[in-house]
Image: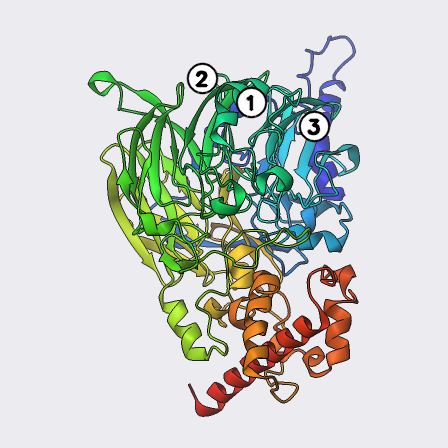
Amino acid sequence: MAALSRIFLAGSALALLAACGPKETAPAPAPEAKAFAAVDTARIETASAGAEWLTYGGTYDEQRHSSLDAVNKDNVDQLGVAWTFDLATNRGVEVTPVVVDGVMFVTSAWSVVYALDAKTGEMLWEHDPDVDRAVGVNACCDVVNRGVAVYDGKIYVGIIDGRLQALDAKTGDLVWETVTVDQSKPYTITGAPRVVNGKVLIGNGGAELGVRGYLSAYDAETGDRVWRFYTVPNPQKQPDGEVSDTAFEQIGNATWGDEGAWVTDGGGGTVWDSIVYDEVNDQIIFGVGNGSPWNRTFRDPSAGDNLFLSSIVAVDANTGEYKWHFQTTPGDNWDYTATQTIILADLPLGEGGAPRRVAMQAPKNGFFYVIDAATGEFISGDAFVPLNWATGLDENGRPIEVPEARYGKVPYNQLPGPLGAHNWHPMAFNPDLNLAYIPAQEIPQAYAEDPRFFTKEIKWNTGADFSAGVPTVATPEVAKFLRSTLKGRLIAWDPVAREPRWTVEHGNAWNGGVLSTAGGLVFQGKLNGDFVAYDAATGDKLWSRNVKSGAGAGPGTYMIDGEQYVTIATGWGSAFALSAGFAYDEKVPSTVGKIVTFKLGGTGEIPDADLPAIDRTPKAEPFGTEAQLAEGVVDYARNCAVCHGPLAVSSGVLPDLRWSAISANPDSWKGVVLEGHYSANGMVSFADYLSEDDVEAIRAYVLAQAHAAAAADDSGE
């Protein structure tokens, strides 16, 4: 705590020296020492993402553009490591650091919070919310956390199990805690809170499993709930006694039928990421997620638009009352969330080229939207990646769908897939160049209706068949082909001209968030571990450093004692890197996540990964009939793939079942899968959904995959 004391006591020492002058001369009143982390709405509004990084997106507009230019195009090649800090987890790391009064606040997996000296990386305090690891089964996309909010001397963090905590910024001690969800349901929280005018705004996740989404506002001082806006109707279409009631009575209820899985499973629509304060219009603009189940045939047979799924919604910042909405994907059928980065900006799109305040988003569905921030009026929408589910948008911004995309029993190979053309990785905007920088990708998916669909309490309930088109035994050549279909790129999108200004192609999908700076730079991390600086105007590569792990999080920057720092959180994991082992680059180890911070002339080093060797040999002989293997494919795809990887190929974050010693013994295998022997680690029992025969079929499939991989290794493929 010594470094933290130095930070806090600097102002007090100056006041003490001023009081020690001659007694005959009355000293001038010492300036009142600024309280630590005394962040309020006014301070965030005027910060302009300069010396500090006060909120998740840098400013309330969430442009992720810094006014700092000490690091610029002329000297960026002199960046070196200033310091690193281990986050003590190999699970997903998605945090954007918040920097206030010389202290950096970051989160890691399982919602652990750290306070670090932003100049040296020394840990000042750590807060572990002590999450029951069994909760991990509810997390669709790893047990990640994207960051904290700072306000009035407190740190606010959403916990993966649905709690919201306020911590003392100086000590990390718990000030208050409230449970924001029904913890008997599979809710999670992974997003960063925002605080506006004394209210903490937080959403939740869980729509893959089956919940009803909402955005809540809590009193920042006490933790009392102020208002809640539901994004899906009450299942009986009755009032909830919340501020969303009027919106559903007037427009929302009519877009849903009276039957379907949404009535019992919640309908989805979780607010799991983007929440933006528009101070000009004094409103909160937030993105709403996918339907639950994904497949509208099961969710709501009436085939309505299902408001407010996949929508951008604006509510009054003080009361939470509905103001407007824009739905990007009516009747969502594909997990096309609208939770991705929402950026506010003034663009020359008004009458005669006058400035017009707009909201911009590049959501999963592949279209870049520009809408009027005051009214929600559609201004423009254009495809920023190849897509085949729609041929374009009509004059109101409604997608013109390809009929086959409303999949049935016949699989439809679709772009984008459920991981989207752009996912949670933060987009940035340079207001000087009027360019939005999109971490875009192509990850296709074969969608098909699940012929065995029924609701399962602790499992994904999508209504889509993940085993569609998967061969009984997939050779490494299949994985190689699938990997060849994955693409990633950084796009500098001109929202006025409605076209890309430049594009940088990457070697794989799922690359990192973006930072824009007044130094004419754009920073982005990549899945292969490269952290790169590009010329913001041209896309030319100016600098690169390998950070020895995946670099998917949003970078940040700040200044202390005249030196500008650039920082990024590293780590493997999160939705794609957790599960898509067939896309895993073994040159990028699944190692402990880190905060890696750079400055001009830095001479530090990034430690190499120290990972145990894995014995990549099958632990038992293959067995099973063709029928048993076919059943194993289906059961594995529905129950195991989202954590242990499609085709039974793990990325290394969680165990690769092909090489597990447990696969050799049917009783040990049953003990883990059915009896929950590893539930303390998050591997809960599946006894409610899998029989002993099902579990043995999965083991047969996993061993078949192991022997196919081993045979390929022996032949040099």
Q: Determine which residue is flagged by label 1.
A: 43
Crowd class of label 2 (few under 14; some 14 to 19; many from 20; radius 10 Å): few
Q: Earlier in the sequence, mark 2 or mark 3?
A: 3
Q: Position of residue 450 (x, y in %)?
A: 51, 57
Q: Nearer the viewer, mark 1 or mark 2?
A: 2
Q: Determine which residue is flagged by label 2.
A: 280
Q: How many marks?
A: 3
Residue 13 appears in the rendering: yes
Residue kind at label 2, given as amino acid type: Val
Helix or strand or loop: what does disc 1 sit on? helix
Q: Position of residue 338 (x, y in %)?
A: 46, 38
Q: Determine which residue is flagged by label 3.
A: 153
Q: Is residue 467 above or below residue 708?
A: above
Helix or strand or loop: what does disc 3 sit on? loop
Residue kind at label 1, given as amino acid type: Arg
Residue kind at label 3, given as amino acid type: Gly
